[in-house]
Image: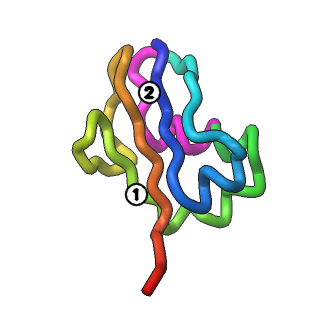
Amino acid sequence: MTLHLRFFASLRERLRAREAERSMPDGSTVGDVWSALCADHPEIEPMSASIAFAVNREYVDRAHRLRDGDELALIPPVSGG
């Protein structure tokens, strides 16, 4: 299946991309996508404990099963004042 990934804040800066397309096996979860991204970009792995995920604009957990064409947003914590 093909997923549309959107990256925000510090994750976008580290990956130097706002979005990407990613192919994953059918039945993959959000956690599977995150693991695959960390394997490709080890520098983002330390963010693992604090990343939030949204599928098609709804917050989900890592166990959420994805479908072909889903949009997965990866959202690190944002600080500011």
Label 2 packing within 10 angstroms: few (<14), some (14-19), many (20+): some
Q: Which residue occupies the extreme left position in the image?
A: 58
Q: Position of residue 59 (x, y in %)?
A: 26, 50
* Residue 12 is a magenta residue: no
> Where does the magenta region start and end?
26-36
Nearer the camera: disc 2 or disc 1: 1
Residue to which mark 1 is pinned: 52
| Mark 2 → mark 1, Cα distance in angstroms | 17 Å
Name the dominant secondary structure of the magenta segment.
helix
Residue in the image at 61% along x and 50% along y = 12
Residue in the image at 46% along x and 26% along y = 4
Q: Position of residue 74 (x, y in %)?
A: 47, 48
Left of 31 or right of it: where is 36? right
- Earlier residue among tags 2 and 1: 2
Amino acid identity at mark 1: Ala
Residue in the image at 26% along x and 41% along y = 57
Which picture quadrant has residue 69? top left
Left of 58 or right of it: where is 6? right
| Disc assigned to residue 28 | 2
Amino acid identity at mark 2: Ser
Which picture quadrant has residue 68? top left
